[in-house]
Image (cartoon, coloured by chain):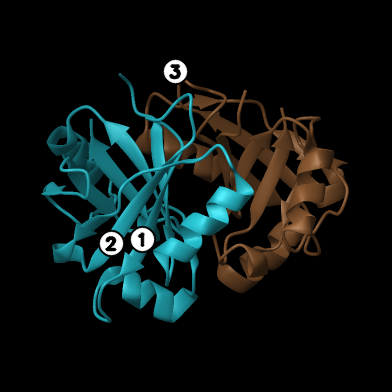
Chain colours: A cyan, B brown
Amino acid sequence: MSSVLAHIGIATFDIEKSVALYRQLCPEVVVNETITVGEQGVIVCFLDFPPHSAQGRIELLQPLNETGPIAKFLAKRGEGLHHICFSCENLTEKLKLLAADGFRLIDKTPRIGALGKPVAFVHPQSTGGTLIEFEEE
Amino acid sequence: MSSVLAHIGIATFDIEKSVALYRQLCPEVVVNETITVGEQGVIVCFLDFPPHSAQGRIELLQPLNETGPIAKFLAKRGEGLHHICFSCENLTEKLKLLAADGFRLIDKTPRIGALGKPVAFVHPQSTGGTLIEFEEE
């Protein structure tokens, strides 16, 4: 499988309120269980839009404390679009290629993301202002 | 077909530079022809990520002048994530439901978007900080 735009991350102060909002906007939305990612100081909830649940999902992100990256983003920019995530087949190899192309890697080696898959972020300063995550399929 | 997250809009000063960037990030990307939307003062370019090209696309948006909404966004926030777009079956009906639910509509009736389909935007003040477009399939 080739790279797809797997999900977009949206920062929120209140994940339950956001879930209710997206249920109103899109009654067909499939709401998954909330996941706590202690290491990143966030709770996340994935929203699926059938029929293609491996592509074009929404990841809602709510901070658990005031020091994590989502808390800092909310303090600076407020609620809203936070990042986009592409899937890839081999993340270690992908990061080598991106580094060779001059992209600024936030994670130089993969770490484990909310879904238990290896992930890594690329800094928006090297991607035209968009924080970009890569996730190994 | 039910609502899906059809695309995400990314504002850029230079669409050609952004296309080159996404080709580096995702060599599998399918780049469509650039479209001029004079009424909105933008040129746009859709990027597809097979196999599901009706879901999870990227719409790059570059201003044609200094007065349109994308030019204003860039002046205020810089390059980056701008909006997300959901598809829907009947946009006129959808807008009635959204208005009844208290959403603040930027377009109270559908207008024709870059792809020749009826579209309408919902104000981020009523959607947790995210500018949301609906597009009739």
Q: Residue at x 81, y 30 (%)?
A: B116
Disc 3, disc 2: CB below 8 Å?
Answer: no
Q: In the image, what residue type sits under mark 3? A: Pro
Q: Residue B51 got which mark?
A: 3
Residue A62 location (% of width, % of height)? 35, 66
Asked if both marks, 2 and 1, belong to the same chain, the answer given is yes
Sequence order check, earlier mark of 2 and 1? 2
Q: Residue A61 got which mark?
A: 1
Does residue B62 appear to the left or right of B47 in the view shown? right
| Mark toward the viewer: 3 or 2 | 2
Name the element at disc 2.
Answer: strand
Q: Nearer the viewer, residue B121 or B23?
A: B121
**Chain where mark 1 sits:** A
State the CA–CA distance, disc 3 to disc 1. Answer: 27 Å
Q: Residue at x 86, y 54 (%)?
A: B108
**Quadrant position of residue A52:** top left
Name the element at disc 1.
Answer: strand
Residue underneath mark 2: A43
Q: Residues within 10 Å of mark 2 (few under 14, many from 20)?
A: some
Residue A109 location (% of width, % of height)? 11, 49
Q: In the image, what residue type sits under mark 1? A: Leu
Residue B78 location (% of width, % of height)? 56, 66
Viewer can see residue B80: no
**Chain where mark 2 sits:** A
Residue A102 location (% of width, % of height)? 28, 49
